């Protein structure tokens, strides 16, 4: 599992280590690690521009500049903050780094020239101490870079919100070199795309206890997968009740049920309108049609109303069984249930849901969070990056998954995901693990369905069993 930590926890962990070290030692470790990566990425006669801002991020970059100059690279330091880390600047100039001040206003000619010639740019404008966005005078900075310049961000790309929540103007790096601990922006959509390749340099700061953001990997699927044993039968493995599809959209039921059965669950009981039931039975003969005992419910994919059984739906919502609410079922809840509940909206559905509930935020992490808090439910927000946001009261980390190819942006793909997650919840996983492993499986199955090319949703569902076998 990949873990990122809140900025407060990172600061506390760094301070604890610093108390045991000589002053400045931690920054020296960061700068040396940064310089080693930069050296490995630069040509023999590399021309390097270091962008140094006001704080310690600029200090890291300037000490790294000193190391690179000592290795005979041609290094220019653009001092772009209101202040400069003086000791680091002295170390850099002592090794021959050429400083140019550009603290505000238009770019000085010498700075523009150095940037145009640089094949390596080190972005040390700001790190974790920054507010989101770039200062006015640097807004068009990337236009000054040579087309083939390799950009390394120190700790995080400048302008990115360190907590990964607010989308803001920022530099885009080819590589981000961070120190011991990942920060939320490295894993969340508002920052991750700007980071490029993420390289972690170990400077000896141990992980705090509780991550702020986590990402499940294949090894987590191997570890957590609900694998049957010799003493299991179909009931002990778990039964998933599915109410999906409608007269207008019966295909959603076929997709979700196919995905659930292929993902692996003891049994699927399907309840739906006639047309959908006939189609499901025709393509998935393993299912049992009609009500009965189940361990979890999946509701809503392909609904154009209450799925034909409103009294049953009300009963289920009052029940103590875990429920996955997808698509049309997202409108069912007005207040928290007393059992685990996972909502699976895409961005448009989240917006509608938040507006219906009269909430302040409607998008991204803040939107998912207010909905999760209002409904006491986990919100799985689907997209190129899929997030799982728990209610604040759980104090649990956010989950951020980027497992599938963009080919998954195709009709029915969300119905398939819902079926996979439903199977995992019925098999006994908590909604967070089921959501995360479901997204991981969805992505892996899409890769298997047609490596590197377009996929149809049904093929993704059909590949689930092979993807599970790979995990195991
Ligand atoms: N702590 C440690 O042990 C270690 C820390 N390490 C390193 O230190 C970094 C954190 O350093 P930090 O705390 O000095 O903050 P940092 O981000 O460099 O600068 C903040 C200053 O910038 C300014 N500013 C604010 N927003 C801005 C904006 N949008 N755009 C432009 N400027 C902006 C504002 O100053 P102002 O210009 O307003 O006076 C503010 O005070 C961390 O990311 C890592 O690289 C490593 O060496 C490992 C050990
Ligand atoms: N650009 C993308 N990259 C990767 N996955 C994506 C992308 N766009 C959408 N997806 C995934 O495809 C699925 C689409 O779900 P959804 O919008 O509910 O589709 P539908 O309602 O047609 O089933 C989600 O799992 C989402 O995470």
Image (tube, grey):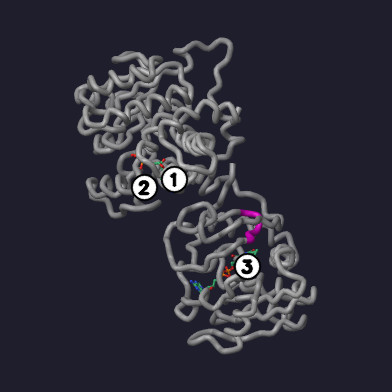
Task: Mark 3 vs mark 1: give the one in front.
Answer: 3
**What residue sits right under mark 3 in the picture?**
150
Q: Is residue 52 magenta?
A: no
Helix, strand or loop at label 1? It is strand
CA distance separating discs 1 and 2: 9 Å
User: Where is residue 452 shown, x and y percent of the image?
Assistant: 53, 43
Specify which label sits upstream in the sequence, 3 or 1. 3
Task: Mark 3 vs mark 2: give the one in front.
Answer: 3
Where, quadrant-wise, is the C terminus in this rendering? top right
**What residue sits right under mark 1 in the picture?**
387
* Neighbours of disc 2 within 10 Å: few (<14), some (14-19), many (20+): many
Q: Main secondary structure of the magenta part?
A: strand
User: Where is residue 347 shown, x and y percent of the image?
Assistant: 34, 48
Q: Is any part of residue 460 visible from this angle?
A: yes
Q: Is there a contact, CB below 8 Å, between mark 3 and mark 2?
A: no
The residue range painted magenta reads 177-181
Ligand 1 occupies quarter: bottom right
* Neighbours of disc 3 within 10 Å: few (<14), some (14-19), many (20+): many
The answer to whether residue 243 is above or below residue 392 is: above
Pick the front one: 446 or 107? 446
Rendered residue at 49%/58% (across/down): 191
Q: Is there a contact, CB below 8 Å, between mark 3 and mark 1?
A: no
CA distance separating discs 3 and 2: 35 Å
């Amino acid at each position: 599992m990949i873990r990122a930590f809140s900025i407060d926890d990172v600061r506390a962990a760094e301070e604890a280590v610093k108390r045991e070290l000589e002053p400045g030692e931690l920054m020296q470790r960061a700068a040396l690690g940064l310089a080693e990566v930069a050296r490995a990425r630069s040509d023999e006669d590399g021309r390097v521009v270091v962008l140094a801002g006001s704080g310690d991020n600029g200090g890291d970059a300037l000490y790294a500049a000193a190391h690179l100059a000592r290795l005979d690279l041609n290094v220019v330091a653009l001092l772009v903050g209101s202040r400069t880390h003086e000791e680091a600047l002295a170390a850099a100039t002592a090794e021959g780094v050429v400083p140019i001040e550009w603290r505000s206003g238009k770019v000085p000619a010498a700075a523009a020239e150095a940037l145009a010639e640089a094949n390596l740019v080190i972005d040390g404008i700001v790190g974790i101490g920054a507010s989101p966005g770039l200062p006015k005078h640097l807004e068009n900075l990337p236009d000054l870079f040579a087309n083939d310049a390799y950009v390394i961000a120190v700790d995080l790309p400048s302008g990115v919100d360190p907590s990964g929540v607010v989308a803001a103007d920022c530099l885009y790096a080819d590589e981000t070199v961070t120190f011991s601990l990942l920060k939320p922006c490295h894993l969340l959509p508002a920052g991750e795309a700007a980071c490029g390749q993420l390289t972690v340099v170990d400077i000896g700061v141990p992980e705090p206890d509780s991550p702020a953001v986590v990402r499940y990997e294949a090894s987590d699927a191997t570890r957590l997968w609900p694998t049957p044993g010799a003493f299991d039968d179909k009931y002990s493995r778990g039964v998933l009740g599915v109410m999906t599809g409608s007269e207008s959209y019966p295909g959603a039921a076929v997709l979700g049920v196919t995905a659930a059965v292929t993902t692996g669950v003891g049994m699927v009981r399907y309840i739906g309108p006639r047309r959908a039931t006939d189609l499901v039975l025709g393509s998935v003969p393993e299912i049992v049609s009609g009500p009965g005992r189940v361990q979890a419910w999946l509701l809503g994919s392909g609904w154009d109303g209450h799925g034909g059984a409103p009294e049953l739906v009300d009963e289920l919502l009052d029940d103590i069984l875990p429920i996955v609410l997808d698509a049309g079922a997202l409108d069912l809840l007005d207040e928290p249930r007393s059992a685990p509940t996972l909502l699976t909206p895409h961005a448009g559905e989240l917006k509608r849901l938040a507006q219906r509930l009269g909430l302040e935020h409607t998008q991204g992490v803040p939107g998912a969070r207010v909905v999760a808090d209002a409904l006491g439910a986990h919100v799985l927000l689907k997209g190129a990056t899929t997030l799982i946001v728990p209610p604040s009261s759980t104090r649990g980390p956010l989950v951020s998954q980027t497992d599938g190819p963009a080919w998954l942006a195709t009709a029915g793909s969300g119905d398939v995901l819902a079926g996979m997650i439903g199977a995992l919840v019925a098999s006994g996983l908590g909604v967070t693990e089921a959501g995360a492993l479901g997204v991981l499986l969805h992505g892996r199955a899409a890769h298997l369905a047609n490596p590197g090319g377009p996929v149809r949703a049904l093929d993704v569902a059909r590949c689930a069993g092979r993807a599970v076998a790979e995990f195991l």
